[in-house]
Amino acid sequence: MASSLTTFTDEAKIALDTLSGRATGLFSPSLRLGVTGLSRAGKTVFISAFVHNLLHGGRLPLFAAQKSGRIARAFLEEQPDDAVPRFQYEDHIAALVNDRLWPDSTRAISELRLTIEYESASGWSRMFSSGRVSVDIVDYPGEWLLDLPLLGKSYGDFSREAFEMAVLPVRVDLSQEWRALSAAVDPKADADEMTARRLAESFAAYLKACKLDERALSTLPPGRFLMPGDLEGSPALTFAPLPDLSERRARSGSLQAMMERRYEAYKTHVVKPFFREHITRLDRQIVLIDALQALNAGPGAMADLERAVTEILACFRPGRGNFLTDFFSRRIDRILVAATKADHLHHESHDRLQAIVRRLADRAVARANFTGADVDVVALAAVRATREGTVKQGRETLPVIIGIPLKGERINGEAFDGKTETAIFPGDLPEKIDAVFDVSGLGHRQGNDDPAIRFVRFRPPKLERTAEGVTLSLPHIRLDRALQFLIGDHLA
């Protein structure tokens, strides 16, 4: 898909930018790491924990350079792109460590440069390596990635697909008001700003309702309708799909012509620059997935998440180049698909969570492997908010997780106060993972009616201190495995 998103002019600009970056990298090696995921998947937390553990020498037994003591130091530097907002690492860490609150979600693109000084593992490499690499971490909303397929779709295609999605069982009630409003307008009528505004607002309200916890749906383009930023109220966001469009060219001055023009403006001025200026410059990528939220919402949400993950991974440029082509074109040679919040499950279910995510990404992973990219799947918790234990229930011993649920979280009608530590049996994920994707017989049932599977959110942990009073780094589950896959080879 990615090859169809650019023109010859776009590719020329990308080549010039890549050549400039490669020339700079000869004297100052760097690696651009993209971090994305749909809302509340934990992007901000992952980056904060990634940096915190390297700055403070965290416990990372699977991260070879750290385990062997070859990292001399890690430190933050000024980022290379002055036009991109800085990832506010210090603010996020203060929220996690001092306030024990999860930081605000990603709302726009941001960047942070972490430089690592290290000693190579081999004498030969030490002769030619600078012993220093900068990791430019690029944080961006996954919702924006879901816009990239729009570049290959006409307004008619976009409208038809939007209405097909809107009548799926998991969406049909949420889209009812917008569909009724759309059915009452004539696409051939004269363009009217207030009509366009009402349609756009109703369409955006439907998308936002799909995103709420009760449904936890993921395939919700256009992404800026959910995260408008400085585009809020602009004509580029004042459009919506229209029903029953003819294949004939719209009459100039009609409502359909207005919508088509604004849809094309959205692609030209919002979607394409994001792809050209950010996605095509990445070397490595991690895609974070909150599968537990979708499991809570039921099979409809899981099927929708599978669709979203496939579309997201199809938008990258995976593969490996050679010495010559790498000077003009970047390829993402490693992609990690990570199921977050593994600390919300007992470790006995981690393999099943990983298998569910493998299924989610299966088709897209196969495509990436075909092009030469290395792809891995992992279940992790960038910040571990719970610990494990057991409780007796009659003659049965149940594995539980222990932590402080966020205020307002509920299980079986019980609401938590955000202060009390609680032992929770989250249930077991099914051995046969096809069951969590089975939407047959879903009808109007929404959410997960199975009380055996229920997940709640927990507060960040209180950091431990050593006997000398030194605060330890943020605890995690398999963050070290993620670091080894994403940057370990550059520190070998």
Image: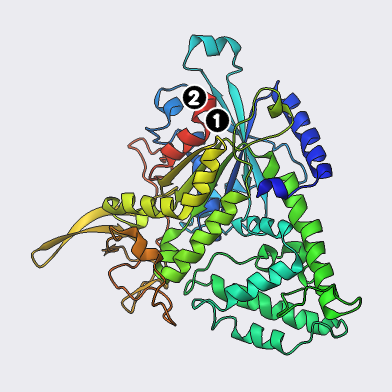
Based on the displayed image, in which of its 4 quarters is residue 193 positioned? bottom right
Identified at 83% across, 83% down, the residue is 188
Q: Report if the CB atoms under discs 1 and 2 are less than 8 Å apart.
A: yes
Instruction: Give amino acid for label 1.
Output: Ala
Residue 150 drawn above or below residue 62: below
Q: Can residue 410 be seen here?
A: yes
Question: Tag on residue 201?
Answer: none
Residue 55 drawn above or below residue 97: above
Identified at 49% across, 73% down, the residue is 215
Mark count: 2
Identified at 60% across, 40% down, the residue is 318
Q: Nearer the viewer, residue 389 or 489?
A: 489
Q: Nearer the viewer, residue 146 or 395?
A: 146
Q: Nearer the viewer, residue 166 or 382?
A: 166
Q: Position of residue 36 (x, y in %)?
A: 58, 51
How many residues crowd mark 2 within 10 Å: few (<14), some (14–19), many (20+)? many
How many residues crowd mark 1 within 10 Å: few (<14), some (14–19), many (20+)? many
Based on the displayed image, in which of its 4 quarters is residue 408 positioned? bottom left
Q: Position of residue 456 (x, y in %)?
A: 38, 66
Outermost residue on the bottom side: it is: 184
Q: Can residue 84 be seen here?
A: no
| Gap in angstroms between the C-alphas marked 1 and 2 | 8 Å
Q: Label 2's element?
A: strand
Per the image, the residue denoted by label 2 is 71
Identified at 73% across, 75% down, the residue is 240
Instruction: Give amino acid for label 2.
Output: Ile
Q: Label 1's element?
A: strand
Residue 320 drawn above or below residue 432: above
Q: Position of residue 78 (x, y in %)?
A: 69, 36
Q: Position of residue 389 (x, y in %)?
A: 22, 54
- Left/right placement of residue 338 relative to residue 36 reads left
Per the image, the residue denoted by label 1 is 74
